[in-house]
Image (tube, helix red, strand yellow):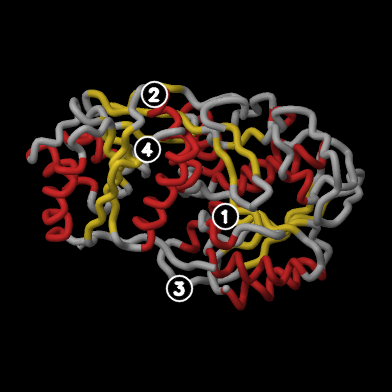
Amino acid sequence: MFAVFKRARKATLSAVAAISTFALAACDPIAIGGGPTINTSKPVPVALLVPRGSAQSGDSVLAQSLENAARLAIADLQGVQIDLRIYDTAGDPTRAAAAATEAVKGGARIILGPVYAEAANAAGIAAAQKGVNVLAFSNTTSIAGGNVFILGPTFDNTARRLTSYAKAQGKGRIVIAGGSNAAGLAGQAAIRNAAAGSGSSITDSIGYELSQQGVINAIPQIRAATSGADALFLTATTAGALPLLTQLLPEAGVKPEDVQYIGLTRWDVPAQTLALPGVQGGWFAMPDPGQAQRFRDRYQSTYGSTPHAIGGLAYDGIAAIGALVGAGKADALTAAALTQGAGFQGTGGIFRLRPDGTNDRGLAIATIQEQKVVVIDPAPSSFSGAGF
């Protein structure tokens, strides 16, 4: 009954101070990690791998949005030249590996993309043979590591932000309710890990089959588990079990005014979700809304359409590359440089790449009041706090 998301696993800122602001601090990597050296006085060859040619509905739109966003970022760079080369993967791992091999042979010093996890993993393996790093648009953490860095938002990052905020608000006794599908299980694991890091405790974890009856059957268990808890952390999506859960739980006596509802996923998308009675007062995390809106406005004014939901990841990738290359160092695209701790400014606020290949993104904490999104804790402007 519920939509199950995503494929695959492992094997603006107007001319807004343009991109000189993309680096949050002077980039000065202390050591050269894996990756090629570059000549920063010449255009830097960057390969962009997109899922154009795929039979999957929407991939052609996604591919164009990624390319548009990358070119928008290049236009914002000051004093940095990028030689962007586009390769179509059709969303296929074999094609992605071949594209990565071709790109590296053609001189690419870093690869942006692909999107899907298996394709990104294949491209990473191919590029590793020549010591080239890959900034994939995936959010699948199992493929991260070595020369593959993922730019997509992760459950781990979101859970860290939310549990840290909840703990600071005195909501440190958490019950998890999550689906038994792969995404639900991954979300539950992320919440448990984040809770341990924030000093919170998981008092119980209730799973349910991803079906209407599965959710109905879990309601009494969730009700019993939340007795004495401060917060109920839900992994459900708005396209999945969230509407039913937030309807049935209050009816069963698990009221948001007694137990703080927290969502691992965005509760503001699609906009119709804001009208659900059960989500009122719930907490969730989101990119810096001001930064995100500036990017959407800029993209709209340039291309006459709205960007794909993950189109901004290509902008972020170019932003990071541009900030590093702009520092004028030959080791700008090595792993040590890419993972410099200060991070970068992107379409949704600050972000940085972690040595394990995952990422941190500075997120705002939002709630829903009278069917409107209200930010209750702004996105951080640096990585010195907010759970980092």
Q: Can residue 313 be seen in this view?
A: yes
Residue matched to label 2:
375
Q: Give the CA separation, mark 1 to mark 2.
A: 27 Å
Quadrant location, the C terminus: top right
Q: Nearer the viewer, residue 323 or 25?
A: 25
Which residue is the site of mark 4? 201
Whether residue 238 is visible, yes or no, is no
Residue 34 x, y percent position in the rendering: 80, 56
Looking at the image, residue 182 lies above or below residue 247: below
Label 4 amino acid? Ser
**Sequence-wise, which precedes: disc 4 or disc 3?**
3
Mark positioned earlier in the residue sequence (3 or 2): 3
Residue 194: x and y, percent? 46, 41
Q: Earlier in the sequence, mark 4 or mark 1?
A: 1
Q: Distance of mark 4 from mark 3, alpha carbons? A: 45 Å
Corner quadrant of residue 283: top left
Residue 374 shown left or right of residue 79 in the figure: left
Label 1 sits on residue:
137
In the picture, residue 285 is in which quadrant? top left
Question: Considering only order in the chain, which callout, 2 or 1, is on the residue closer to the N terminus?
Answer: 1
Which numbered mark, 4 or 1, is in the foreground of this view? 4
Q: What element carries label 2?
A: strand
**Sequence-earlier tag: 1 or 3:** 3
Instruction: Say what amino acid the circle numbered 3 marks.
Output: Ala
Which element type, helix, strand or loop, lies under badge 1? loop
Residue at 82% from the left image edge and 45% from the top image edge = 332
* Residue position marked by numbered label 3 in the rendering: 55
- At label 2, which amino acid type do we have? Val
- Tell me the SS state at disc 3: loop
